[in-house]
Image (spheres, grey):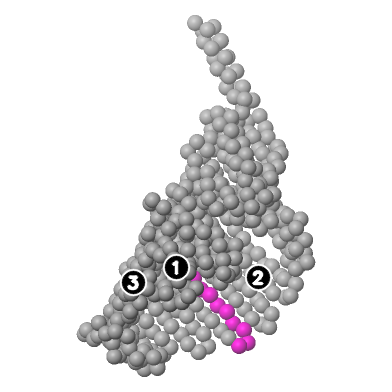
Amino acid sequence: MSKKLLIIGAVIVAVLAALPLVGNMGVKKITEERITMLEANGIKVDQSDNGSSYMTTKRHYEFTLEDATAFKNYLSTLSKAQVPAYLNTMLDDVVMGADVEYSNLLISSDVLVDLYPIAFSQEAGARMRVEDAKLYEQMTAMLENREFMYHMEYDVSGERFKGHIKDIDKTIIFEDGRVANIVFEKAVFKGEGTLVEPKSVDLNVKRANLDFSLPDNAKMKLMMEDLSSQSTFSAKNSFDLTYEAKRLTFHFNDAMSKLEVSAIDMKTTSKSATTDGKLHTTVDASVKQFSMEDLNNSVALENFAFKMDADNVDEVAYEAFQKASEQSAAGSQYTMLAAVGVVSKGFNVNIEKLSVEKIAINDSKMMDGFNHTIKIDVKEDDNLIQKLQVSPMALLQNIDVDAKLNFDSEFYAYMKAQGNNVSMADNYAKINGDEVLFDIILKDGQVSVNGQSL
């Protein structure tokens, strides 16, 4: 019996010892599938051994954009927010690198991945050298030192990943004398799905700062603290997104102007879904405190809130508008026609809440603010483009609006005293205690306020 046990034990040991020689075929297969997919969509992939051993496989990959049209067409199948930054980077003519490491044991499905830009393409490098040789030298050095890096652990079998983005604290000097200080600190993330098409991503960033010293003693500074986002994706136009920031400050000044902006406790949640070719989107945004000040004016708000939903938006027309916006300037004829295409299909917008709890303007005290609700129904009209060519006002016949505007009386009185043409509204205003109300109706091109026609 003991001899048989020894033989069985020897066989088991031999099999276990051979496992690393066989390799982790599961991880290898999935990796090769991802590479094949990228190659089929315009990305050239070069790979080489990176110091593999008996127990571990290590591979180095380099990804270069070869067919921009094919790659853009692939990215267009995803939600914009779903596309990882390292994929978008390749559209800017940056060569991406990846170091992949995994165990050769079949029982392991964990993969270590470092993703980082390694070089500019020849064309991009030549352009940057002409535009700013000093910037090119510094950026090239940063790429060589791998100062822009995602480090992650990926569970292939469970399609889960987690990791961090390398901290950045760098000063860049431009040829024209500008100086930029960049700080990006303690960014961690986790998610589910593949690294190319994630199903969900959670990101937290402790601090992100950009400080510019510009010519003529001008300065610009942007600072953000405690940023976070949560994203889930089920289809291109079906997703849930939440963005939060503890604090944002922006400062700009030069010899002629000055601008200060501050916001505390910002949060935006948006949800989008598609049913039978129609989009439904909701947005819920809030800011606890906001202030803005220039050399002449200032405004301070407390508890800003915005809550809106839009539905019955034609998905095909909306995607055509998105594509036109990406390919053309906002005011181009192509983009405008695509926008009219969305409107011609009709949709509904319900602004359930647009409010500010407290507001102060210039030297005023803090006053109660306002609370509005607005409903907009746009009728479907396949002949809208032809009608607009005859008269731009034809659009009003297709829009119904029901707006209920509610101002605190003290705030309304302050606005009147500033001479902002608010006094013209007095003929239509409805006073209800400490509130000034305006019930505005637009229907069949006719407008009424509190029952009075305009």
Disc 1 marks a residue whose amino acid type is: Leu
Instruction: Work out which quarter of the rendered image holds the C terminus and state it.
Output: bottom left
Q: Mark 2 points at which residue?
A: 180
Q: Residue 400 carries which label?
A: 3
84 relative position to 356: left or right = right
Say if 273 sits above or below 353 in the image: above
Quick one: label 3 or label 1, which is nearer the N terminus? Answer: 1
Please name whichever residue, 357 or 351, is drawn nearer the observer in this view of the structure: 351
Magenta residues, start to end: 244-256
Image location (x, y in percent) of residue 335:
54, 66
Quick one: label 2 or label 3, which is nearer the N terminus? Answer: 2
Q: Badge 2 local density, few (<14 within 10 Å), some, or many (20+)?
A: some
Q: Badge 3 local density, few (<14 within 10 Å), some, or many (20+)?
A: many
Please name whichever residue, 404 or 169, is drawn nearer the observer in this view of the structure: 404
Q: Is mark 3 on a helix, strand or loop?
A: strand
Q: Residue at x 65, y 64 (%)?
A: 170
Q: Is mark 2 on a helix, strand or loop?
A: strand
Viewer-side label of 1, 2: 1
Between the residue at mark 1 and the residue at mark 2, the CA separation in whole angstroms equals 49 Å
Q: Name the residue under label 1.
A: 384
Q: Is residue 248 visible?
A: yes
Disc 2 marks a residue whose amino acid type is: Ala
Q: Can residue 225 be seen in this view?
A: no
Residue 171: image quadrant is: bottom right
Say if 452 sits above or below 18 in the image: below
